[in-house]
Amino acid sequence: MIRMLALACALLLVAACPCTCPWLAAPALAQQVEGSGLPPYGPPITLDQAKRVMAAAELEAAKNSWTVAITILDSGGNMVMFHKIDNAQLSAVSVSQGKARTALQFKRPSKDLDDAIARGGAGNRLLALKDITPLEGGLPIVVDGKIIGAIGVSGAVSSQDAQVAKAGNDALAAQ
């Protein structure tokens, strides 16, 4: 009986919590959602844009001798480009795709979900979601305030994957 009462109290506390999205625990993210700051999906990334993103990402990986896989998705979740640098580990293929898909579906860097899980507590609910890759290295590609696609990188340390993804993403910001 005491266990049932404790469970009921715990459920009431969870229900009373105003934050229904565990990854919104970070103040900047909470502010974005409250102010509708998340960008809308826009037209799909063009092949020319994807080529520029890929070239910049590959250059960053080559400059640092990182053997990675790079995936670029359009705003509808369709693969536009994929490159696997010679000798990249086999797991990098599916992980780079997962990081890009996660960034696209959640409209935020995949690291945000990684951080929410690392904080524990309510963030652990993300582990129940199917087909997410909550690891650093996935970024939405935003042009003119709209998400036109996403880039995911895998094969190095997660922070290095993110550095490669950022280099690719920055290629469009410079236009």
Image (spheres, rainbow, N blue to C red):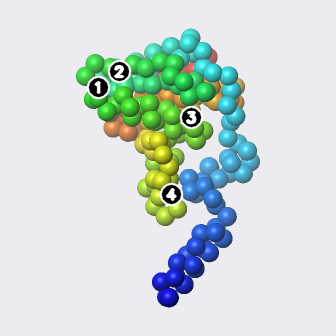
Residue displayed at 67% across by 31% down: 41
Vertical comparison of 4 with 168: above or below: below
Amino acid marked by disc 4: Arg
Q: Residue at the spot x=60%, y=20% of the render?
A: 45
The span from disc 4 to disc 2 (Cα, nearest Å) is 32 Å
CB atoms of marks 3 and 4 within 8 Å? no
Q: How far apart are marks 1 and 2 (CA)?
A: 6 Å
- What separation in Å lies between label 2 and label 3 (alpha carbons)? 20 Å
* Residue farthest toward the right in the current orientation of the protein: 35
Amino acid type assigned to the residue bearing label 1 in the image: Ala
Where's residue 120, x and y in %?
46, 61
User: How many numbered circles does the render carry?
Assistant: 4
Q: Is residue 156 visible?
A: yes
Describe residue 18's horizontal placement relative to residue 6 as left or right.
right
Residue density around tag 1, few if under 14, some if 14–19, many if 20 or more, within 10 Å = some
Residue 115: where, in percent of width, then height? Answer: 47, 51
Q: How crowded is mark 3: few (under 14 residues within 10 Å), some or many (20 or more)?
A: many
Q: Which of marks 2 and 3 is nearer the N terminus?
A: 2
Q: Tag 3 or tag 1, which sits nearer the N-term?
A: 1
Are circles 1 and 3 on residues that touch, CB within 8 Å? Answer: no
Element at label 2: strand
Q: Mark 1 points at which residue?
A: 88
Which mark, by number, is residue 104? Answer: 3
Residue bearing the label numbered 2: 84
The residue tagged 4 is 125
Q: Which of marks 4 and 1 is nearer the N terminus?
A: 1
